[in-house]
Image: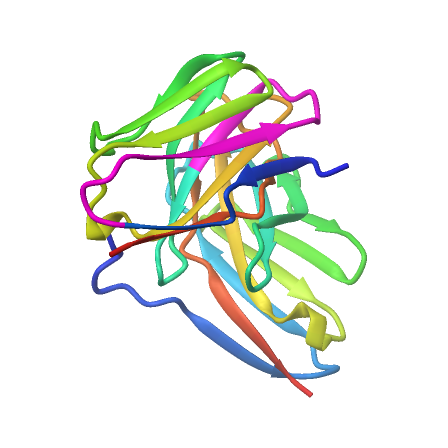
Amino acid sequence: DTAVSQTPKYLVTQMGNDKSIKCEQNLGHDTMYWYKQDSKKFLKIMFSYNNKELIINETVPNRFSPKSPDKAHLNLHINSLELGDSAVYFCASSPWGLAQQYFGPGTRLTVL
Amino acid sequence: GESVGLHLPTLSVQEGDNSIINCAYSNSASDYFIWYKQESGKGPQFIIDIRSNMDKRQGQRVTVLLNKTVKHLSLQIAATQPGDSAVYFCAENSLTSNQFYFGTGTSLTVIP
């Protein structure tokens, strides 16, 4: 009965590849988020969706594209992966925007 | 990209002592604040929150203090235990302008 789940947990890939990370929440929340956490633990928001609608789109390369097929899912697709994309990516959800967020376990992406 | 030039603040305390983790927030319009705890290899987890109409809120072994005059937030942990070792983040939210920010985080190490 995991609240926010992400797959895969680890992702190792070559530069230039395209990859996706999936996120699902079973909490019935309206809002979902993607964060990037670097090796110094700084947590940066990338995107936020409310009821499948994009509401926050921070300055990230357009190689990153979120997709929300329904309000329980928010996937992150990354094109032409670069070394600097290596990080831990967290998905989160909240009952409404700006409320307490519930985070997934993270996906550690390593680009070689 | 990476948070170049910035370092994660660290705090070391003896087991049983009280810990105080500080956070300076930036937006004077922020009106809702949350503390999160991130253990190694996991996503951040909610600890406690406080609204701007309060200056103190207590939970189990944790207390959050808010000083709006100097835009300062603190998290006090009583009788710190080894399980409290983690990175702690403050998050500031502006419900009126629909903005939120995560702080840089503080790494707490409890010495047995």
Number of numbered tags placed on the structure image: 0
Give the image quarter of residue A59.
Answer: top left
Q: How is the image coloured?
A: rainbow
Residue B57 location (% of width, % of height): 72, 48
Seen from the viewer's position, the closer of residues A43 and B58 is A43
Q: Which residues are magenta?
A: A14-34
Residue B16 location (% of width, % of height): 75, 82
Residue B61 location (% of width, % of height): 78, 63
Is residue A97 something that shows in the picture? Answer: no
Name the residue at 48% across, 64% down: B106
Q: Quadrant of the C terminus of chain B?
A: bottom right
Seen from the viewer's position, the closer of residues B95 and A88 is A88
Name the residue at 59% across, 62% down: B39
- Residue B68's place in the image compared with B51, above or below, is below
Residue A43 location (% of width, % of height): 41, 49
Seen in the image, is A102 located left or right of residue B6? right
Seen from the viewer's position, the closer of residues A12 and B55 is A12
Seen in the image, is B45 located left or right of residue A49? right
- Residue A54's place in the image compared with B71, above or below, is above
Name the residue at 61% across, 59% down: B75
Is residue B69 something that shows in the picture? Answer: yes
Name the residue at 47% across, 56% down: B23
Seen from the viewer's position, the closer of residues B15 and A40 is A40
**Outermost residue, right side:** B60
Q: Is residue B83 magenta?
A: no
Q: Is residue A31 magenta?
A: yes
- Residue B10's place in the image compared with B42, above or below, is below
Give the image quarter of residue B28.
Answer: top left
Seen in the image, is B60 located left or right of residue A103? right
- Residue A94's place in the image compared with B59, above or below, is above
